[in-house]
Image: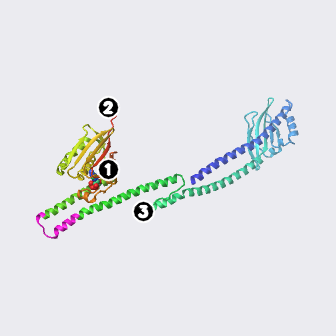
């Protein structure tokens, strides 16, 4: 607001000063024109005088004419020897400091103030047939001066009024334009973790403010859903942790209720150990996801040979397959397939998918791990002949804590976090994960990871 008033005032100042200067120039020009024509008359008079006329004669001639003419009211003429030819009665009483003109036939024009009145004076050297006269001739300029004074007062009054009005209107307009911002600030101040569902008032102004509120509302939407996910995650995690802990407690309490045989104690301790192992696994997975949620800063991606990673996990699963009486086959691409990745996470991804395949495939059945290369993508597939997943469940299984059959999955040791972790890993590698399945006919999980593209034309390679 202050800047606006300052710029406006500066504009007024520049405008007013230029108008004043232009008007003064034009008004003085009018007076000067009159002066110059009177000088022209005087020149004609001097030309008409005899060449050998004495100063006394000239004095007499001039007095005869100029004593009765207005043109002579403020006139003083000297000849080239400095002798006074004519001096009006006004100039006899008010002597002027004489400005000696240095150019011949070009008047030097000055404004003078005498006795509170304003005059324009022309000082000039006149060359009349070789004789040089020095003259000063004045004309009253009070009218011009008064007009200028009046103009300046009007200008000042109007400029001040205009400044006040524009400041007032500007203030009102800026208040009006920024009023919604105040409302936004008030609402935004009230929004906290407990009322994240509140939104800023939507505006229909079609301007930056509307875009700002819309964007902030979208941001609140995202924050709310993230917040809800975290709250849900915490609630689910606590619930999942409570189950094994209460199982351990119950097992111990029941065992301690009366004295037992050694084998009974052993049995109880085994149960407790199993639950403790499950709890450890759950806590590890929770930690893994918490780390994932806190950002990808710690991931150090490097070029990874995918077939090698897969082969390194296969051997331990071969033992599991043998123990569970399942067929396990692999078809891993023989050549080097490099992707940008984190080896531990990629191993973890393969383990999660194989773990599920073995968990949800009853004996007799088969599990197959394959790696192929299609265009610029490495495709890992884990296919099993197990129970499969119904169509409507297929999207949900990647959600945290989602299990198709809670009781059975828990029995198998899962808490519903494996695929959530797998999806996070795949996304970190800029890949995609999908599932194809028919209930009762097994499931196929497919992971696609972008290959490191080697440009054959690259000058580095051709060197
Ligand atoms: P969990 O640790 O319970 O296995 P996941 O997130 O790995 O959790 O899987 C979520 C759910 O998806 C599982 O509870 C299971 O019902 C289903 N699921 C995952 N993989 C398979 C599969 N290969 N065959 C059938 N169902 C599966």
Q: Residue furthest bottom?
A: 258
**Quadrant the N terminus occupies:** bottom right
Which circle, 1 or 3, is nearer the viewer? 1
Which stretch appears magenta?
247-263
Left or right relative to 329: residue 214: right
| C-alpha separation, residue under disc 1 versus residue under disc 2 | 35 Å
**Marks 1,3: beta carbons within 8 A:** no
Q: Identify the disc placed on residue 214.
A: none
- The image position of residue 9, as x and y in percent, is 62, 51
| C-alpha separation, residue under disc 1 versus residue under disc 3 | 31 Å
Pick whichever, 34 or 345, lies toward us: 345
155 inside magenta stretch: no
Tag 2 residue: 461
**Element type where label 3 sits in the image:** helix
Q: Identify the disc placed on residue 423.
A: 1
Tag 3 residue: 195
């Amino acid at each position: 607001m202050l800047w606006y008033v300052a710029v406006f005032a500066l504009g007024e100042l520049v405008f007013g000063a230029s108008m004043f200067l232009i008007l003064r120039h034009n008004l003085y020009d009018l007076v000067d024109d009159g002066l110059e024509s009177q000088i022209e008359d005087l020149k004609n008079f001097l030309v008409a005088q005899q060449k050998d006329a004495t100063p006394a004669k000239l004095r007499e001639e001039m007095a005869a004419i100029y004593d009765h003419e207005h043109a002579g009211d403020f006139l003083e003429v000297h000849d080239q020897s400095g002798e006074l030819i004519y001096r009006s009665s006004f100039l006899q009483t008010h002597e002027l400091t004489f400005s000696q003109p240095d150019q011949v036939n070009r008047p030097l024009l000055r404004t003078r103030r005498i006795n509170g009145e304003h005059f324009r004076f022309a000082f000039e050297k006149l060359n009349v047939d070789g004789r040089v006269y020095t003259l000063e001739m004045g004309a009253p300029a009070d009218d011009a001066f008064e007009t200028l004074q009046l103009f300046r007062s009007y200008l000042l009054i109007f400029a001040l009024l205009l400044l006040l009005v524009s400041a007032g209107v500007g203030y009102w307009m800026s208040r009006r334009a920024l009023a919604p911002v105040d409302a936004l600030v008030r609402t935004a101040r009230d929004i906290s973790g407990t009322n994240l569902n509140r939104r800023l008032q939507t505006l229909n102004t079609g301007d930056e403010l509307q875009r700002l509120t819309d964007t902030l509302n979208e941001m609140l939407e995202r924050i709310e859903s993230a917040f809800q996910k975290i709250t849900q995650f915490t609630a689910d995690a606590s619930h999942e942790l409570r189950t094994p802990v209460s199982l351990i407690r119950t097992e111990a309490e029941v065992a301690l209720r009366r004295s037992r045989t050694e084998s009974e104690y052993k049995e109880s301790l085994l149960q407790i150990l199993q639950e403790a192992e499950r709890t450890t696994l759950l806590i590890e997975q929770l930690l893994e996801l918490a780390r994932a949620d806190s950002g990808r800063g710690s991931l150090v991606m490097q070029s990874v040979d995918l077939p090698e990673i897969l082969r390194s996990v296969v051997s331990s699963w071969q033992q599991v397959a043998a123990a569970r009486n399942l067929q396990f086959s692999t078809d891993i691409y023989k050549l080097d397939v490099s992707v940008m990745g984190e080896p531990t996470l990629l191993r973890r991804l393969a383990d999660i998918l194989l773990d599920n395949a073995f968990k949800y495939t009853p004996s007799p059945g088969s599990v197959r791990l394959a790696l192929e290369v299609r265009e610029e993508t490495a495709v890992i597939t884990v296919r099993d002949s197990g129970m499969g997943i119904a169509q409507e469940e297929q999207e949900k299984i990647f959600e945290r804590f989602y299990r198709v059959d809670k009781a059975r999955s828990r029995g198998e040791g899962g808490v519903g976090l494996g695929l959530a972790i797998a999806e996070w890993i795949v996304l970190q590698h800029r890949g995609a994960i999908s599932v194809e399945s028919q209930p009762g006919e097994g499931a196929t999980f497919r992971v696609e990871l972008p290959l490191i593209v080697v440009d054959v034309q690259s000058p580095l390679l051709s060197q």
